[in-house]
Amino acid sequence: MTGAPRDEQDSEELSYDDGSRVIIGEAVGDDIVVEGALRPRTLESFIGQQRVKDQLGLVLEAASARGSSADHVLLAGPPGLGKTTLSMIIAAELGMPLRVTSGPALQHAGDLAAVLSSLVPGEVLFLDEIHRMSRAAEEMLYLAMEDFRVDIIVGKGPGATAIPLELPAFTLVGATTRAGLLPGPLRDRFGFTAHMDFYDTADLLAIAVRSARLLEVSLTADAAAEIASRSRGTPRVANRLLRRVRDFAQVRADGNIDLAITRAALALYEVDDIGLDRLDRAVLDSLLRRFGGGPVGLSTLAVSVGEEPETVETVCEPFLVRAGLLARTPRGRVATPAAWRHLGLRPPAHSAGLTLFAGAPEQGDTFALDNSPWADLDNPPEVVGEAGHGAEVRAL
């Protein structure tokens, strides 16, 4: 027998911190342990990212044919898309061991020197969050990537001496969620850069089905599709939602996952039909109800939901923008028509047009741009009349 979602009082106990959000891309809680059992081991079994797989497969096959180390590889993209998994696959495809470290762990040149000097020939070094390395370690890495050597500085001041240390040939696999923070000289030293995209629903469905099989969970096709559609284009989120639905099915039902169980479980965790959770909806609701759809500044919007601006900007906004629910403009955040529809609210009508902005748009501002959030309107809006608060927005 299935149970109903928690009542409103219980729902309020959920906080907005990352640990309570089941839809974030970063690894939290038991993700790291469980993901180890779910990771594919070969490029062939890796689902999605076909363009990256084809290009990377060619690089690895050529290196194996030459009997040499592969070019250094940079994997760039949002959290949860499989960068760590691909690094493990690269090492496996090359038949080499994998060494793992991260940018935050390399705060001094000596930290990096210790790692590099212990590598064996052909080893793959996975450097996660490479954009968070210290400048000193970064500069040492330049020489190591290009010439397979580092200069160890002995002593201080005028008497300091640089002692060259030869390194075995190795393959560096760097991973970053913020490729724009990498300096040009570092980016240029990677022979292959893969920009990883969000996954489509078909690939996420295949991932959910595969993970259910590995977890020995009975999952119907429509339940898998429901999980995929709410996973925000991210395999890690799909796997996390699957585990939470599995828990719900085991406690509230007979352990089998069907569509009804899936919907009840995701309602309990407050994940709606497009993958928004309570914090996402709180941001949208405040933008619409308190600020009339915007524009409103980031800090003001964050205060209205009791969050730090950085949290709203980095945790909520990327998906809201990608989902076409929010637009960033020079004057602040603006809700799109899709946001009003998603929350079941009506935009405030004004005269013959539609007031989409509670801020101060300028006369003649036009939002009917190609691929804009207003592209689905038959008559995209234009600001007319005097500039200022409550300016009329009429159809073009």
Image (cartoon, rainbow, N blue to C red):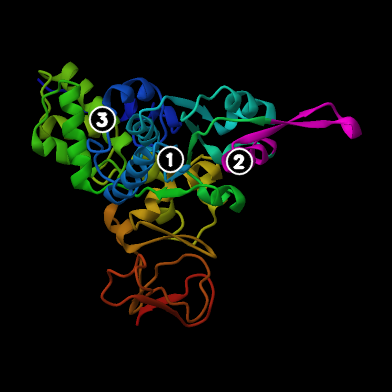
Q: Is residue 158 magenta?
A: yes
- Does 236 sit left or right of 156 as displayed? left
Please name the residue that numbered disc 2 is placed on: 147
Q: Residue 86 falls in which quadrant of the image? A: top left
Front residue of 144 and 198: 144
Of tags 1 and 3, which is closer to the observer? 1
Q: Is residue 12 left or right of residue 342?
A: right
User: Does 347 lie within the magenta span?
Assistant: no
> Which residue is denoted by mark 3 in the rendering?
268
Q: Which residues are magenta?
A: 136-164
Q: Residue at x 54, y 73 (%)?
A: 388
Q: Position of residue 96 (x, y in %)?
A: 40, 27
Tag 1: residue type?
Ala
Which callout, 2 or 3, points to the residue nearer the camera? Answer: 2
Q: Which residue is found at the position 55% from the left and 45% from the top?
A: 309
Secondary structure beneath disc 1? loop
Most foreground residue, 187 or 35: 187
Q: Please say if the residues under marks 2 and 3 sit with CB atoms less than 8 Å apart.
A: no
Task: For marks 2 and 3, give the CA distance.
Answer: 55 Å
Which callout, 1 or 2, points at the residue further toward the start of the chain?
1
